[in-house]
């Protein structure tokens, strides 16, 4: 994790490390624990796997000595395999950091073996729990160190694509939906991909923020408190809402086409879209919802997308944006003629030249 640019220094902030300074970070916990959250860049080389971890834990309740013996046997077998398959690429001058849940037995056995071989090894004091406390602490502080340029606009107007074009042209971009693996609406789940846990999202967010230069603005899409099942930290939301806003929009035909491209799986199975939308029936009324069902049965997805935006997403977004950004109507407004990346590239360059410089001047 590169702390350069936001003033974080190694071995400060509750004793956390400059993670980028290590050649290898070993997470000694079980795969299940690793999947829930881990230090960015860490490699899961568990001393016991999920089943072994459960077996040792169960045995420990009745026979601690036998549990430790079993755990030691599993640990040495697994570490031997990891050394053969993973450690051979690292020379003895490599810096290695290792951690487990509390910085106890699992990381210590890794440290002892590696130091015996001749590696330079450090162990995270307090383990993942200390790291997690540090992440929570930093997410209450770090987001407020930046000035945000918030891109707002209705569903399907190309906000995410514009952020990509901005990033391609050198802007600092915080793509929260990418970090959350979700497009931020009731139909926003990404096919074939699960969202990260809240803890892993927090780790990814802090890592991304740590790459930014606080003297330059950060571009971000206007978001609600939740993106799918993960929540944004209050410090980020509050600072975003005090930032510079711009409004973008696109003709309805362009917006419908974008949804058809981004949600192509609903073109093939419009019934699954209706199932996602079913809880909206009481909000839009039975008559409108029945129109949606009829269009889905006819596989008329373009008209279904248009009605969905006109009768639900647009008025809902309008209420939300006015609540969170009351001055949004005074923001610069841009009507996009097209939403392809080739058409958005010159728009991004112009925005960086026009908006980013103004934002910096206001902040300073």
Image (spheres, rainbow, N blue to C red):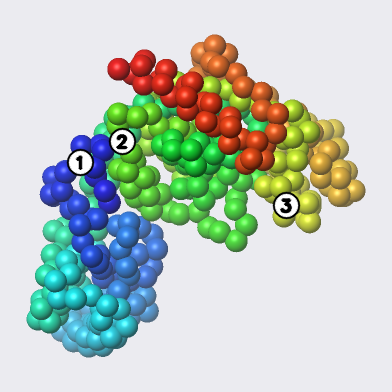
Q: Residue at x 25, y 81 (%)?
A: 88
Q: From the viewer's side, name the closer residue of 331 and 36.
A: 331
Q: Secondary structure at mark 2?
A: loop
- Give the alpha-carbon distance from disc 1 to disc 3, as whole Å: 42 Å
Q: CA distance from mark 2 to mark 3?
A: 37 Å
- Left or right of 316, for residue 173: left
The alpha-carbon separation of the residues under discs 1 and 2 comes to 12 Å
Circle 1 is placed at which residue position? 8
Q: Is residue 142 left or right of residue 182?
A: left
Which sits in the foreground, 175 or 352?
A: 352
Task: Name the disc covering residue 264, or none.
Answer: 3
Residue lying furthest right: 298
Residue 243 at what x, y percent from top left?
41, 22
Residue located beneath label 2 in the image: 213
The residue drawn where x is 43% and y is 24% is 356
- Where residue 4 sits, quadrant-wise, is top left
Would residue 260 be seen by someone viewing this image from the given angle? yes
Residue 280 falls in which quadrant of the image? top right
- Decide: is 146 above or below 301: above
Q: Is residue 315 left or right of residue 75?
A: right
In this rendered view, identify the residue nearer to me: 198 or 327: 327
Percent coordinates x, y for residue 99 in the rendering? 21, 64
Is 364 rendered above or below residue 149?
above
Say few, some or many: other residues with alpha carbon within 10 Å of mark 1 (under 14 / 14 to 19 / 20 or more): some
């Amino acid at each position: 994790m590169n702390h350069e640019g936001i003033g974080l220094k190694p071995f400060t902030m509750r004793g956390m490390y400059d993670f980028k300074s290590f050649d290898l970070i070993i997470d000694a916990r079980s795969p299940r624990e690793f999947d829930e959250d881990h230090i960015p860049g860490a490699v899961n080389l568990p001393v016991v796997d999920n089943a072994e971890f459960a077996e040792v834990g169960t045995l420990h309740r009745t026979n601690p000595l036998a549990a430790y013996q079993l755990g030691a046997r599993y640990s040495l077998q697994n570490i031997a395999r990891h050394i053969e398959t993973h450690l051979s690429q690292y020379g003895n001058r490599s810096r290695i950091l290792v951690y487990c849940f509390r910085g106890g037995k699992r990381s210590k056995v890794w440290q002892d073996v590696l130091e015996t071989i001749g590696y330079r090894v450090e162990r995270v004091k307090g383990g993942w729990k200390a790291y997690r406390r540090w992440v929570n602490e930093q997410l209450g502080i770090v987001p407020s160190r930046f000035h945000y340029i918030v891109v707002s606009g209705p569903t399907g107007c190309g906000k995410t694509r514009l952020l990509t074009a901005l990033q391609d042209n050198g802007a600092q971009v915080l793509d929260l939906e990418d970090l959350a693996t979700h497009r931020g609406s009731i139909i926003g789940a990404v096919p074939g991909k699960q969202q990260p846990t809240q803890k892993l999202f927090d780790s990814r967010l802090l890592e991304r923020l740590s790459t930014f230069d606080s003297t330059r603005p950060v571009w971000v899409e206007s978001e609600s408190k939740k993106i799918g099942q993960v929540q944004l930290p209050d410090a980020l939301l509050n600072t975003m809402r005090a930032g510079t806003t711009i409004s973008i929009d696109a003709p309805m035909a362009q917006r419908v086409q974008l949804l058809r491209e981004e949600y192509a799986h609903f073109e093939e199975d419009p019934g699954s879209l209706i199932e996602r939308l079913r809880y909206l029936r009481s909000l839009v009324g039975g008559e409108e919802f029945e129109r949606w069902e009829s269009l889905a049965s006819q596989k008329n997805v373009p008209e279904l997308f248009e009605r969905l935006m006109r009768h639900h997403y647009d008025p809902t977004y309008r209420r939300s944006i006015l609540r969170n950004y009351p001055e949004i109507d005074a923001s610069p407004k841009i009507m996009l003629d097209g939403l392809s990346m080739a058409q958005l590239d010159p728009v991004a360059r112009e925005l960086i030249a026009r908006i980013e410089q103004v934002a910096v001047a206001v902040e300073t």
